[in-house]
Image (tube, coloured by chain):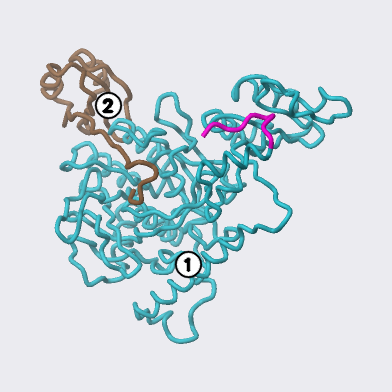
Chain colours: A cyan, B brown
Amino acid sequence: MMPPPLDASVDEMLAAAAADGGDPAAGNAFLTGRSIVTYARDEAAGVARSLGFNAGARVASAEDFDDGIVDFAALGDAQSVLFPELGVALLSAEPEARGMVATMAADATNPIATIEPETFVFPSARDLGEYLRGFAAASARIGADWLDQAGDAAAAAPGTVDAAALAATWGLQATGAATNPLTGRGIKVAVLDTGFYFPHPDFAGRPVAQASFIFGQTALDVFGHGTHCMGTACGPRAPAGVPRYGIASEASIFVGKVLSNTGSGTSATVLAGMNWAVANRCPVISMSLGAPGGPAAFYTQAGQAALNAGCLIVAAAGNESRRPGTIAPTGSPGNSPTIMSVAAVDDHLRIAVFSCGGKVEIAGPGVDVFSSWPLPLRYKTISGTSMATPHVAGIAALLAQSSPTLRGIALWRALTGRTRHLPLPASDVGAGLVHV
Amino acid sequence: MAELVVTLRGDAPFDTIGRLERAGLKVGQHLRELNMVTGTSDPDAIARLRALDEVADVSEAQTIQLPPGDSAVQ
């Protein structure tokens, strides 16, 4: 959707939001489509140049108006207007330009600090928090049901359910990550995917190393897949207003963009990302990607090179099955013997209907997984072996933190040696459900 | 032109990149940590590349495509 111009009336924007199918439960109906940028107050000139160059068209300023009183109807073709006294700018820019501004905001050397969606303001309390509290309550109920059904000796006894665990997603509870004190601190975790949405508020202040292997595109995630995976592997311990969804909350984040803004890539982009992650000696490399086909010699060698360097690669098994009728074979690169392949299970610990089988080492939570997503949505619940894989990566980071000897093949063995047994074929779930 | 991944043997000599180029590979990246080279070539160069002593494997790159962003299964 094109953002409303700066001179649009509130009524016009509300009508446009409604016509666009805004969904109050998802928070969409509260967004105007424009953006708010914050910046260092004494850097207005530099910010004006940046916005003019990257976000396009003319930049206006409240200083252009008598007494600083902005007449929005007189802004003409300006696509942004600065409020120098506040260190704030209003921006009407298309998604690509917003992405470029977001990239600047993620750069600590740029005076632009944040970019967030502009929201409608109502006189009465239309509270998005109600929805989020409802979600948390539902998640807690699902978690309690699961603990009862699974008969977890440590947690299912009446009255012993950890309150903190109930504030986490079902996947973090099922894997033991919700109650484990480890955080992955000091462990580099590389997620090779569509990039990462750096301005996500849940990751504010987290240092991020990044590299893009897609020509002409920054590592900023506009697709969402990479941000979701990173959220599960490395998201915060206590996100505001939503259940905990991230595992290695203090791991060092390495973002390798190997899939484009449309979710596509080739072996060459993936290998380039793997090479970067290994060169940085990331003990955990998560790849929620793949393609049908037999094992590729290059992925097998890449996985071996990684293991030799103390780096473990985990990869999605694939989603091509249609169970119970059709079980598709594990795709590439997960089918290489030197790469750990991850299957998906649901919250009843059943194999996911889509999860590929054959060469599988381990299973992770991969159905109805709640995690981070680029703004304005902020969070999303989706399914796939792509979602199971970062659960394994996050727990691998916790184990790696527990001992400097757990690297490479030793980390592989530690992961597969401490799974929760599942009454399912090894060709479906390998050693069982990943568990910290 | 085929997009290729050339996997090298562990003992590849110093001028391997030059030998790959002379065999017809337009080198994209030398991935030193993985001991591989990516690039493009005419299909008829693949056999020449495979014949080099320092080359363990020559494969065409696979294409990867995620499902659409609004898909429930990723």
Pinpoint residue A70: horizontal percent, then vertical percent: 80, 30
Residue A73 coordinates in the image, percent (x, y): 74, 27
Give the amino acid at mark 1.
Answer: Ala
Q: Which residues are magenta?
A: A1-9
Expressed as whole percent of the image width and height from the top left, the position of residue A32 reads: 62, 40
Q: Is residue A3 magenta?
A: yes
Residue A131: quadrant of the picture: bottom right
Instruction: Pick the residue in front: A122 or A267.
Output: A122
Foreground pick, A219 / A15: A15
Q: Nearer the viewer, residue A85 or A284?
A: A85
Residue at the spot 33% in from the left edge and 32% down from the top edge: A269
Give the chain of mark 1.
A
User: Seen in the image, is A406 located left or right of residue A336?
Assistant: right
Q: Looking at the image, which residue is at 53% across and 47% down?
A: A22
Residue underneath mark 1: A178
Q: Is residue A271 above or below residue B47?
A: below
Report the residue that reaches farthest toward the bottom.
Answer: A158
Judge whether A174 appears above or below A358 on screen: below
Side of A305 relative to A390 (left or right): left
Say yes or no: labels 2 and 1 on the same chain.
no
Residue drawn at 83 percent across, 24 percent down: A65
Q: Are marks 2 and 1 in contact (CB under 8 Å)?
A: no
Q: Which residue is mark 2?
A: B37
Q: Secondary structure at mark 2?
A: strand
Residue A92 shows in the view? yes
Residue farthest to the right, as pictured: A67
Q: Please, what is the three-letter code of the amino acid marked with disc 2?
A: Val
Q: Nearer the viewer, residue A243 or A187?
A: A243
Q: Chain of mark 2?
A: B
